[in-house]
Each structure stands twice: as structure tokens, then as C-alpha cells.
Image (cartoon, rainbow, N blue to C red):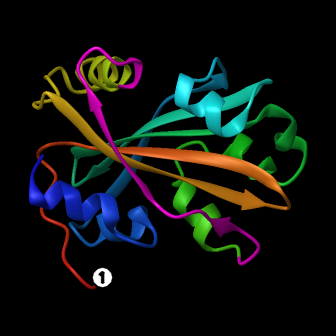
């Protein structure tokens, strides 16, 4: 994994805000949003039940740079995470970082290797969306859990190997 991707994994604050600094046009393309099964590591963090899963690709100036997945209890759509249901192509980051009642766990870096369920999902979605391959044997990403009124929302962000270097101090 490159030093640049390691910096993205540790970069605090809003990923949306950081990506917007890379170009003129930031865009969210929704791949899917539905009640769906959780990945093993999500079940360990969030437990069992019905969950809304939203998977998106984040683009800057038309270039796809991040695959992201957010997971929240389906019941929370009638409560603290109700805004998730109507996000569409708006970035989740605005909802999370503009609300002072939302707390975030420390960032957790991830390296999904070939053969894992997360690795396969990212690579399949990337190829379907871009028509090209992911470009790396490892999927480097990070996750964190946001809490609003006691209800958790987990976000995982996978960084494309072509992602430009993250500038320090921003």
C-alpha cells in the first residue's frame, strides 16, 4: 500500500470536504440503497437485525476515487437517521459533519486482501461502474462508527489506488 493511501486512511474530518479540494466538481453516484445482509465485520460491530445498506462511488471531476458503504439499523430511518432515506446523490458527509449531535469513533484503517468478502464486493462494483479493474491487489480503506441519539451508523470508505496524495494539515 502506498504512503499516500495511508495518509487518506488517517485523515481526520470529512472525506467529502477533502475530496472537494481535489477538483472543481464533486459527485456521488449511488450504486444501491436497500435493506441487505451485513458483512461479517459489520455484524461484529453492529449486531444482528435489519439494516439499510447504501453503497456509492465518490467522483471528483468525473474520476471515481472512493467506494463507500454506510450501514444503519432500518428502524433508525424513522428516528435519528431518517435523513438517510432521502439522501439520493447527496453526500452522507454533510449529514454527519453538519450535526453537532453526531459523535464519531476513532478511524480504523483496513486492508482487505484478495479472497475476502469486502475485497470482492469493492472490485465487482468498481468494475461494473468504471468498466475497469480496481488496480491493486489490496483494497485500502477505513471505517468509523457515527452515533446519533445512541444509534450507530457505520461507514466504510475504500480508496482507489489512483487517489492523489492527501495533503497534510487539511
Residue at the disc numbered 1: 170
Q: Residues within 10 Å of mark 1 (few under 14, many from 20)?
A: few
Residue situated in front as seen by the camera: 118 or 84: 118
Q: Which residues are magenta?
A: 100-118
Residue at 13% from the left image edge and 60% from the top image edge? 4
Name the quadrant containing residue 61: bottom left
Q: Is residue 160 above or below residue 49?
A: below
Q: Report the side of 1 relative to 98 (left or right).
A: left
Residue situated in front as seen by the camera: 57 or 153: 153
Residue 95 percent across, percent down from the top left: 64, 62
**Secondary structure of the residue carrying numbered label 1:** loop
Residue 39 visible within the image:
no
Residue 130 percent across, percent down from the top left: 21, 27
Taking the magenta stretch, the answer to whether it contains residue 128 is no
Outermost residue to the front: 44
Q: Report the side of 1 relative to 101 (left or right).
A: left
Amino acid at each position: 500500500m502506498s504512503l499516500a493511501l495511508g495518509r487518506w486512511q488517517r485523515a481526520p474530518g470529512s472525506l467529502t470536504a477533502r475530496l472537494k479540494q481535489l477538483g472543481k466538481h464533486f459527485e456521488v453516484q449511488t450504486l444501491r440503497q436497500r435493506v441487505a445482509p451485513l458483512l461479517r465485520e459489520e455484524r461484529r460491530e453492529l449486531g444482528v437485525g435489519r439494516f439499510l445498506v447504501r453503497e456509492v462511488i465518490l467522483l471528483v471531476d468525473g474520476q471515481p476515487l472512493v467506494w463507500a458503504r454506510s450501514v444503519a439499523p432500518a428502524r433508525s430511518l424513522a428516528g435519528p437517521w431518517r435523513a438517510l432515506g432521502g439522501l439520493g446523490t447527496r453526500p452522507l458527509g454533510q449529514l454527519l459533519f453538519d450535526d453537532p449531535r453526531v459523535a464519531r469513533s476513532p478511524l480504523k484503517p483496513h486492508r482487505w486482501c484478495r479472497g475476502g468478502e469486502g475485497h470482492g464486493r469493492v472490485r465487482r462494483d468498481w468494475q461494473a461502474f468504471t468498466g475497469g479493474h480496481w488496480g491493486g491487489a489490496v483494497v485500502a480503506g477505513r471505517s468509523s462508527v457515527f452515533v446519533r441519539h445512541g444509534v450507530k451508523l457505520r461507514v466504510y470508505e475504500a480508496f482507489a489506488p489512483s487517489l492523489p496524495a492527501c495533503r497534510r494539515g487539511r
